[in-house]
Amino acid sequence: MSDPLSIGNEMTQFDRKNRNFYDSLTDDEKKKFSPYIMIRWGSLVGGNADLQAYYVMSCNENLNKHFFDINTTQHKKLQWLLATTVSPGMGTHRHQWLALPKKGPTDKSGKFLRRLFPTLKDDDIALLSSLNTKDDLKQLALAHGMTEKEIKELL
């Protein structure tokens, strides 16, 4: 027998709008069921652009909007029932994992620029980092009143 919590089976039940799926799980399976992971997988499908856009917008509207307002440990069934509203009922689709975005710059120059310009977007920080040399950044730091010691630590 296949694992009911395999992501393939969950997404099949998700697309089929199986409102009884959560109730069919054993107590151990219910403990392991993760609404958050289900949403990450459920929001991204292969296929034409219109279908992809539909799934993203439907997940955002029906699940993501108030996801953390619902206690995920006590109301997993409610979250599953909400998830069954996402699919347009057009058969099953190949779902993909939606990776989390990177959390900002990881290189020294990017971190330095983030410190100077905290309101810039990550893409803008990455662009500035790629366009400026270490000497350019050092001059920028001096212009912002940093000492040689601070600059050496940051860059």
Image: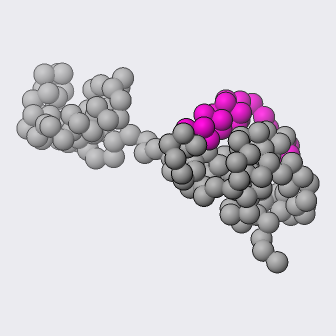
Labels in figure, total: 0
Where residue 87 appears, x then y in whole percent? 71, 44
Where residue 50 appears, x then y in whole percent? 54, 39
- Closest to the observer, 107 or 76: 76
The residue lying furthest to the bottom in this view is 1
- Which image quadrant is residue 112 in? top left
Q: Which residues are magenta?
A: 53-77
> Can residue 97 be seen here?
no
Question: Is residue 127 shown in magenta?
Answer: no
Which residue shows up at 34% across the image and 42% down it?
Answer: 105
Could you tell me which quadrant the C terminus lies in? top left
* Secondary structure character of the magenta stretch overall: helix
Question: Is residue 63 shown in magenta?
Answer: yes
Could you tell me which quadrant the N terminus lies in? bottom right
Which residue shows up at 11% across the image and 40% down it?
Answer: 133
- Which image quadrant is residue 9 in? bottom right
Where residue 139 appears, x then y in whole percent? 9, 29
Name above or below for residue 83 compared with residue 38.
above
Name above or below for residue 113 compared with residue 87.
above
Q: Is residue 102 left or right of residue 53?
A: left
Which residue shows up at 26% across the image and 44% down it?
Answer: 108
- Closest to the observer, 56 or 92: 92
- Closest to the observer, 121 or 82: 82
Which residue shows up at 74% across the image and 45% down it?
Answer: 89
> Can residue 55 be seen here?
yes
Where residue 132 appears, x then y in whole percent? 13, 37
The colour scheme used to paint the residues is one colour
Name above or below for residue 86 compared with residue 115.
below
